[in-house]
Image: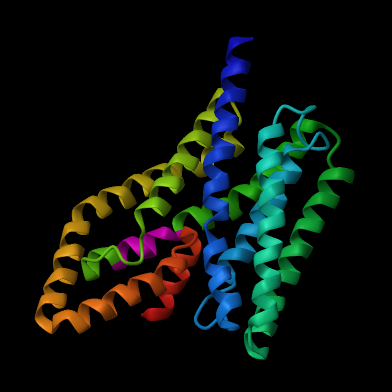
Amino acid sequence: MVPDTVRVAVGILGNAASMLLYTTPILTFRWVIRKGNVEEFSCVPYILALLNCLLYTWYGLPVVSSGWENLPVATINGLGILLEVAFIAIYLRFAPAEKKRFALQLVLPALALFGLTAALSSFAARTHRSRKAFVGSVGLVASVSMYTSPMVAAKRVIATKSVEFMPFSLSLFSFLSSALWMAYGLLGRDLFIASPNFIGVPVGVLQLLLYCIYRRDHGAAAGAEAQAHGPAAAADQEKGMKAAAPVAVQPQEVAARVSEYK
């Protein structure tokens, strides 16, 4: 009884951390709506996140899991579906024709993959154990691709000695979410939930360490530039920081944006 209570409590905390992580792009899309253009933003992180949320919502439902043993997994990923659909819809609304076609070419296969996974797990697999193994394996691949993407941002931080593309709050929420869901999976002896976070936790720790190492260099460089160019440069820098603040989004998007700058 006690382990189940602890597991539920950890799941609730995991929901809170994941909610903070999922809602971060709201600032980005407020900026997109205000500008009326997606500019250099990529749709790929949101489509990958949508696929991941679809798979793990299905994984947490009684069709796949036994009863409501994974209710916290289903609830937070269900919320993630709503948010990612909203983000993708806004992206499609303001993206130019070429980017819109590219987004649709990714969304449709992602939805088809989820539909095929849901159908096979419902009709081909006969037991909850076999359904969890099948859906969890597909979800594991999707999750690993999401958790490894911040390594691109980490490489950029080391190369530039700047944490501009890796905000502290984003790294912190990513680490907390991964750590809590890893604990949740281990408490329930569910490796399909815990395994992706075996990658997510060390990646989150690396991000936080890099932030602590390079944040002073970033601040010192910004201050030196402001002193070198006078009050006008300082004002321009402040405006730039305000304009850049909304683009601090999910780790996948940071990685995608950094890739575009290369």
Q: Taking 144 as reference, is 9 above or below it?
A: above
Extreme right residue here?
A: 123
Apparent side of residue 172 relative to residue 222 in the rendered image (left or right): right
Among the 4 quarters of the image, the one containing residue 103: bottom right
Main secondary-structure element of the magenta-colored stretch: helix
Residue depicted at x 55% and y 44%: 18
Quadrant, the C terminus: bottom left
Quadrant, the N terminus: top right
Q: Taking 236 as reference, is 192 above or below it?
A: above
Q: Position of residue 254 (x, y in %)?
A: 44, 66
Q: Position of residue 54 (x, y in %)?
A: 72, 52
Residue 239 in magenta stretch: no
Q: Position of residue 61 (x, y in %)?
A: 78, 38
Residue depicted at x 57% and y 62%: 26
Residue depicted at x 41% and y 67%: 245
Question: Magenta segment range?
Answer: 149-156
Q: Position of residue 20 (x, y in %)?
A: 53, 48
